[in-house]
Amino acid sequence: MADAATSHAQQPKDASGVLVLADGTVIWGRGFGAIGEAVGEVCFNTAMTGYQEVMTDPSYAAQIVTFTFPHIGNVGTNEEDLESQVEGAVGCVVREDVTAPSNFRSRREFSDWLKSKGKIGLSGVDTRALTRRIRLSGAPNAVIAHSPEGNFDIPALIKRAQAWPGLEGMDLARVVSREKQEGWEGGVWTLGKGYARSPRDARPHVVAIDYGAKDNIFRNLVKAGAQVTVVPAQTSLDRILELKPDGVFLSNGPGDPAATGAYAVPTIKSLLEKDVPIFGICLGHQMLALAAGARTTKMHQGHRGANHPVQRREDGVVEITSMNHGFAVDNNALPDNVEETHVSLFDGSNCGIAVKGKRAFGVQYHPEASPGPQDSFYLFEKFVGMLG
């Protein structure tokens, strides 16, 4: 319906949804899912599968996901593929209208599921043009809105998009983190069997700090041989140590790592000083880097998808990875005590570090692969192998 490269002041007759960018660009489409409006940063994701996992990933909090794959919603939804029960993406933009689901696992049509989760969808958009715009100009702030009657106050939506401060300086981890400590029990999912249960045998104990974690990360820690206790993002050092961890895991999450680091970094620094084994993913990787003296920067467009090639510095092996991040560790300013272990083959940005002299490492990508390839599961085994 809409060419995302230009502004459209004239509303088409069948337009029941709209995406309004902070620069005044108006992109019309057909709304589905929840009715209303939501503000956030517009990004794009190149994954061909796993849209339900993407929409329930807390790392997408305060973001509107543009899917480059045109047929989103065609396999429906189910309760097994949720990555979290907390807030994820506020909305999504897709090319084709959502069709009836064609999947024996489907329990609910995508539009109905979005509505139940309070998330807004917009179809009929030239997502290729919108993706090119993001690549050229960066990820814009915007408002996505859905009104079945087509009633929109465009000037007010533009003002709301312009007034939103953006993700820089925003601590969203405390918003999406769980509020209470939890003993994690679930294992990975297999077809016909569902989710495995965590064995009751003696295992290394991992305390996982939840900055907005995907559940499949905890499942993979269990699969790798760990017993997992999940704690809120702002859990104190004393409380973590009271749990007697053999190792500490730092989860993924949304927002600006520098903002979350205000309370997270001092705790991680103390854990490093005590030589507690640490493994960080995505935001957790960035928290570890900040604690070790590195710095983070806002990326132009970010990395989001399930096909990102990453090279391991140690031996040159290339892993195809799943990614979702708009900030990165600045590999031009790494301190002497930090070694770069992985690098993106797309743009050369940092994708992994190890703290010299410590049992601590992190990766920018998502080795839990939900959705995505499974090249990097070895990292969970590496971490659990350090414990005991």
Image (spheres, rainbow, N blue to C red):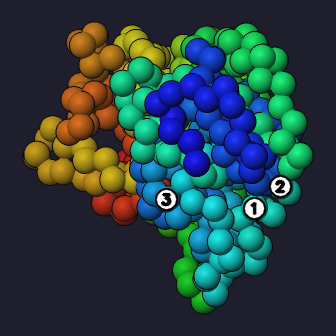
Q: SS of the residue at dot 2?
A: helix
User: Mark 3 belongs to which amino acid?
Assistant: Pro
Decide if residue 214 is in sight here.
Answer: no
Tell me what residue is drawn at x 65 percent, y 71 percent: 99
Residue ID for mark 2: 115
User: Mark 1 belongs to which amino acid?
Assistant: Ser
Residue ID for mark 1: 111
Mark 1 or 3, nearer chain start: 3
Query: Viewed as shown, does residue 341 lie left or right of 387?
Result: left
Residue 378, x across and y down, in percent: 33, 58
Q: SS of the residue at dot 1?
A: helix
- Res. 70 mark: 3
Alpha-carbon distance for marks 1 and 3? 15 Å
Query: Pointers 2 and 1 in contact (CB under 8 A)?
Result: yes
Viewer-side residue, 53 vs 329: 53
Q: Is residue 318 above or below residue 304?
A: below
Query: Pointers 2 and 3 in contact (CB under 8 A)?
Result: no
User: Mark 2 belongs to which amino acid?
Assistant: Lys
Residue 170, x across and y down, in percent: 65, 16
Viewer-side residue, 341 vs 24: 24
Q: SS of the residue at dot 3?
A: loop
